[in-house]
Amino acid sequence: MNIHEYQAKMILRQYGIPTSTGVVILKREDIDRLIDELNADLYVVKAQIHAGGRGKAGGVKVVKEKDLAKKAAHAMFGINLVTPQTSAEGQKVQRIYVEAGCDIGQEYYFSAVFNRSKSKITFITSTEGGVDIEEVAHSNPEKIIEVTVDPAIGMKPFYQREIAYRLGFKGEQIKQMMQIVESTYKAFVETDANQIEINPLITKTDGSLLALDAKINFDDNALFKHPNILGLRDEDEENVLETKAATAGISYVKMEGNIGCMVNGAGLAMATMDIIKLYGAQPANFLDVGGGADRERVSEAFKIILSDSGVQGILVNIFGGIMRCDIIAEGIIAAVKEIGITVPLVVRLAGTNFELGRDILKNSGLKIIAASDLGDAAEKIVAALQ
């Protein structure tokens, strides 16, 4: 789960990490009043969306006067902001954060991520801050600093010193950076984060460090332990179908293709999407109904798939283990009759009671195309669309 910049800064401040101060605007009619409450020599108006690249897209404006800040906020509120990390339609700006600006000495990149290849927390830092870290890693990989923390010993001062020294800090800045590293690690562990990113982390003209921007991503599977963090969720920033699927207990990710997929098991779902691409088409989604899906969940999965206007055909690929193929077949028939599916539907069943499931589909009288294996299923759904 992602949260907005101003929410991330709120969490960082709770752990003692210095951040800039500002006001959050949730309604257009509050713009003038809230900006009047903020007194600064420099105003930074920031669109709050769950996507990077806001600055290049016009989602960050720096002005010197309060009236200009109001004007920028009014112009920004409600627009569809298109960045490299949004769809072509962009993301509607429904929240704005206006904060006090400051003079910047130097910008750094600083983040903590869960390193899945090592099953450890890794700090990724660089003296090249304020820019896309992916570009730095591509063009100047030697400027990427990685420090991985051994969970058996936890965060120790030598980790903190290594990061501070390798970033080139001196004197009092070393102590400040060590404190930021320690606090970030503590925040990461205690909130079950997947990533905490500060880009840029800056030095001000007086030499002190400040988190100028912040991003935090949390592990969805741990949110039940953190109702306060779950309360920060902004469903307007999430795909409507993905939110609906999550409520129904279905793993769903919207994609850009035209073949809807309904599969049980994440690995099988990935293989299904791969073979659709192998046969020259594009999957419209990742959808895992889970190992114990019943008729109701199968029906709900169809509804979610068909809510995507880009879907022109559906491929069902089920391997029956805990889930019996005859129950799935009955769920498919019930869904087709209830929803009235008008796009081509190809079904491949294997595993427990697959013969019975095939017979149920065959004798249903519905226009369901049966497939013998995964390759046959992909070939038939692509052919049906053509």
Image (cartoon, rainbow, N blue to C red):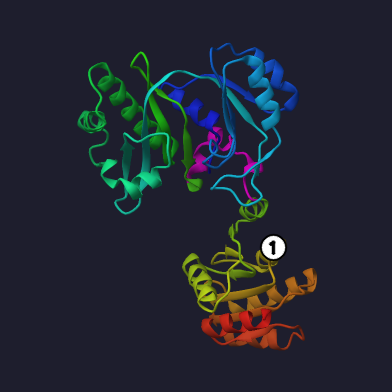
Q: Which residues are magenta?
A: 222-239
Horizontal arrangement in the rendering, residue 293 relative to residue 180 (left or right): right
For the residue carrying disc 1, how many other residues have a C-alpha within 10 Å: few (<14), some (14-19), or many (20+)? many
Residue 71 found in image quarter: top right
Amino acid type of the residue that numbered disc 1 sits on in the rendered structure? Glu
Horizontal arrangement in the rendering, residue 53 relative to residue 314 (left or right): left
* 232 inside magenta stretch: yes
Q: Residue at x 56, y 87 (%)?
A: 372
Q: Residue at x 66, y 88 (%)?
A: 359
**Which residue bears the numbered disc 1?**
300
Quadrant placement of the C terminus? bottom right
Residue 254 found in image quarter: bottom right
User: Could you tell me residue 87's position as x and y percent?
Assistant: 61, 51
User: Could you tell me residue 194's position as x and y percent?
Assistant: 43, 43
User: Could you tell me residue 329's position as x and y percent?
Assistant: 66, 78
* Vertical order, 206 against 355 (above or below): above
Q: Residue at x 64, y 46 (%)?
A: 90
Of 142 and 294, nearer the camera is 142
User: Could you tell me residue 100's position as x and y percent?
Assistant: 53, 18
Report whether residue 382 is seen. yes
- Badge count: 1
* Vertical order, 301 against 90 (above or below): below
* 282 inside magenta stretch: no
* Vertical order, 80 against 210 (above or below): below
